[in-house]
Image (cartoon, helix red, strand yellow):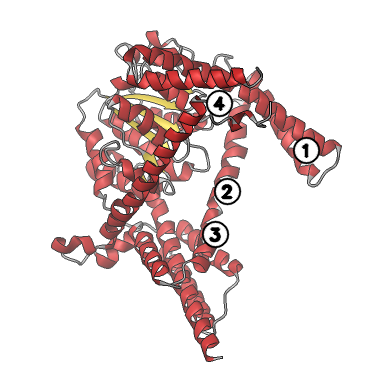
Amino acid sequence: MTNIGLYFSIGIIVIGLLAILRYSLKGKDIDRRIIFLFMFITVASSLLFKMEFPEKPTLIVKKVFNKIENLPEGSRILISFDFDPAMKPEVMPMANAFVRHCMVKKHKLYIMTLWATGQALMLESIEEVLKPEFPDAVYGEDYTSLGFKAGGVGVLNVIITDFRKMYATDEHGTPLDEIPLFAEVTSAKDMDLILPIGGGAPGPKEWILFVGDPGKVPIAPGLAAVVAPLIYPYYPKQAIGLLGGVKGAAEYESELLRNYDQFKDMDTPALSMMGPQTMAHIVIIAFIIIGNITYFRKRRMNDNA
Amino acid sequence: MKRLIPVLITSIVGTVLVFSVFFPMAETWGEDFSLFFDIIAVFAFFLGGGNLVRVHLIKVLNKKGDWKFSIVTLIAFAITLTAGLFKFGSVDIAASVTAEGTWMQTIFNNIIAPLSSTMYALLAFFVASASYRAFRAKNREATILLIAAFIILLGRTPLGMFMTGWIPEWFSIAQIPNLAVWIMNGPNLAGQRAILIGVGLGVVAMSLRLILGMDRTYLGSDHD
C-alpha cells in the first residue's frame, strides 16, 4: 500500500514535470507558485510514504566515527549543542548519534551549550536518548551537563585554561568539585575529543579557533549543510573529520546501525530525511534543466525575430 | 575626555589580549578580561530588552504601521520574561529554567521550536525557485557553476551512488559522490582558504587600528 502511494506520487510529479517541460519549450517562464507546489508534493509524499535509501559513509564522516570508536574506554568527550530549533531537524540527529556512540563505548560525556536556545535541545537529548537507552549511566560519573553560559567566545577563552573560572556549578547547581567527572579535569585541554554541533556563531568554527587549535584538542564538528563548506578549510588538521547536514548525519546513523546490533531498532531521523532530500534535489535539478530549456528557447526565438 | 577613556580602555584590553596569547605570564589577564566581558554582556541583555520594549511601545502608542504586531511582540516578551524569571512550573527554584514541566519549556516546545523550524523549512521552497531562475548557462563561468551545482546536488543524495556506482574502483573519482567531495575539498577549499587568509589579515589590520586609536568609528560620531 505504501509503495502504491509512493509510485502514485512520483507518477504525478513526473507527469507534472513533463507538462511543464512542454510549456517551457514555448519559451515561457513558469510561475514560482507552481515550483512551490511541486516541492510541497515531493517532500510531503516522500515523508508520508517513508521513502528511504541505503547510505554509505564517506571518508570524512568515517574518520569521526573511527575516532570515537578507537578512543580507549573512559575517554573524555565534550559535546556542545550550539544550535536552535531552526537547525534542529538537521543537526539533532548528529547529536543523538554522537551521544549513543559515546555511551555505548563507555566514554565520559561532558555536555554544554553556548546558545540559550540550545539548553532545551540539550536536555531533550539527555531525557529522550541518553537516559532511556542507557539507564545504567550515572549522572556525574558517566555524563554531566554544564548547561548554557552566555558570553560566546568569551566562554571558550576561559575554559581553554580553567572550567571552574567560568562554571562554578553544573546545570543543576552542584559545584564542579563535587562532580566525579571533573575530579581530574581542569580545562578543555583535558578533553580527548570535542564534538561541537551547530551552524552559527559561536559554533564549531569558534571551537576550532579558540579551543581545538590552541589547546591541541581534536575536534570533529557536526554542521548544518549551509556552513559545512566554510569549515572544510580546517579539515583534516584542525578538524579531524566532519558531518555536513542531513547527509552527514544519515551516514553516521548508517555506520552505527552497521556496527552495533543493539541500535537496529533506534530512531533514525536523518536516514528517514534522506528520502525527501533526494526527491527534492531531483525536482530542483529538473527545474534547473527546464529553466535552461526556457532560456535557450527564448534566446533562439529572439534571434529569429 | 569622553572619547579618550574609551579609546584607552580599548587599547589596554586589546594589547593585553594579544599579549595573553604569546606570553604565558599574561594568560590569566586574558582570562580575566574574558570574564569581564561575560559580566558586561549581562548588561547588554538589559539594554536589548529595554530597547525592544521602548521601540515597540512607541510604535503602539503612536499607532505607526503594523502596530498590532508590536502588541504581539510586547505580550510575548512579557510572558516569556515572567516565565523565565520566576521559573513557573518548576519544582525547585535552583532547577534549570527549561527543566521538565516549566512554563519556559512549554513555550519553547510549543511556540519557539515549531515557529523556527517552519521558517527554516520554507527555505526549501525559495531555494527551488531561486535555482530555477539563477542557474542558467548564460556563459562559460555560469555553465561551470551549473555543472558543479548538479554534481553537489546529486552527490548529497544516495542517487549519486545509484547512478555511478557501476564505475570501477580504480576510476572511483568519477563516481558522483566522490566528485562532490573533490569539489568541496579542491576548488571550494582553495577559495575558502583564500577568503579566510584575506579576512584574517583584514582583522589584524583593523585590530591594530583600534588598539592604536586610529579608528574610532565604534564610538559613534567622530566629533568630540
For disc 1, the marked residue is B71
Q: Mark 2 falls on what kind of element? A: helix
- Secondary element under disc 3, as helix, strand or loop, is helix
**Image mark for residue A26:** none
The residue nearer to you, when weighing A148 against A40, is A148
Q: Are labels 2 and 1 on one chain?
A: yes
Q: Nearer the viewer, residue A78 or B180?
A: B180
- Choose top left, top right, bottom left or bottom right for residue B80: top right
Q: Which image quarter is the N terminus of chain B in?
A: top right
* Nearest to N terminus: mark 1 or mark 4: 1
Pointer 3: what residue? B125
The quarter of the picture where residue B201 lies is top left
Q: Is residue B74 above or below residue B97?
A: below
Instruction: Kindly give the residue lying farthest to the left in the view shown.
Output: B170
Amino acid on which the number 2 mark rests in the picture: Thr
In primary-sequence order, the first of circles 1 and 3 is: 1
Q: Identify residue type, mark 4.
A: Thr
